[in-house]
Image (tube, rainbow, N blue to C red):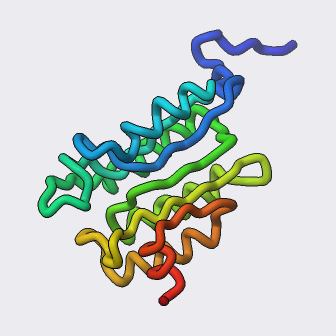
């Protein structure tokens, strides 16, 4: 005799639609980050699943900004996605605000990446020849390690120089 699980306890399949995990910040002003990526990805017919890294009043290229680090909440979001059994066709990273956050993203790629998942790392580290004020030498080293896990990296000239030590 077989048992049938009640419908409310069965895990629905959330993987019928193509999904991209977008690991980036929410920036209030500055035409960047999730504010720009989300509508483009959605227009492509791909579900964009945002894993927030931080909330910024404006991007870090301005002389001052407000920065709230979401590292303490990232693992909680990942646990919930794991419970849902989510699978991603792509993982795209952007602004990462701490060395610990880079480690969380590295673990995420190890768990949710794979042969059917394209990983793109945008090493948002600096501009105009200088690292952003939020970046430390340790973060630069960790970012170089993270880019090694990517299928595609999109550094600007400053970031390419930082990553290569030039």
Q: Is residue 80 left or right of residue 73?
A: right
Q: What residue sits 84% from the left and 15% below the top? A: 2
Q: Residue furthest bottom?
A: 166
Task: Please tell me whether residue 156 is drawn above or below residue 6 in the rendered image.
Answer: below
**What percent of the width, then of the height, locates residue 118?**
69, 51
Q: In the rendering, at what x and y percent does residue 159 appear? A: 45, 73
Residue at image x 55%, y 33%? 41
In the rendered view of the protein, which quadrant contains the N terminus? top right
The quarter holding residue 152 reads bottom right
Figure disc tally: 0
Image-based side of 59 in relation to 116, left or right:
left
Left or right: residue 54 versus residue 102 is left
Residue closest to the eye, 98 or 128: 128
Q: Quadrant of residue 109?
A: bottom right
x%, y% of residue 5? 69, 15
Instruction: Pick whichever, 34 or 70, lies toward us.
Output: 34
Q: Position of residue 161 (x, y in %)?
A: 47, 81
Side of 154 relative to 131 (left or right) = right
């Amino acid at each position: 005799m077989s048992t049938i699980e009640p419908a409310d306890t069965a895990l629905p399949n959330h993987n019928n639609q193509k999904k991209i995990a977008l690991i980036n910040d929410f920036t209030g002003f500055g035409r960047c980050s999730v504010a720009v990526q989300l509508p483009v990805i959605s227009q492509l017919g791909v579900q964009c699943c945002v894993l927030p890294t931080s909330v910024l009043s404006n991007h870090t290229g301005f002389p001052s900004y407000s920065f709230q680090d979401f590292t303490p909440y990232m693992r909680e979001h990942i646990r919930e996605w794991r419970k849902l059994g989510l699978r991603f066709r792509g993982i795209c990273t952007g602004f990462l605000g701490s060395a610990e956050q880079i480690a969380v993203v590295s673990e995420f790629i190890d768990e949710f990446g794979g042969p059917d998942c394209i990983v793109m790392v945008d090493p948002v580290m600096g501009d105009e020849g200088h690292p952003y004020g939020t970046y430390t030498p340790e973060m630069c080293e960790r970012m170089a390690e993270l880019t090694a896990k990517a299928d595609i990296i999109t550094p600007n000239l400053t970031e390419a120089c930082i990553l290569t030590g030039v």
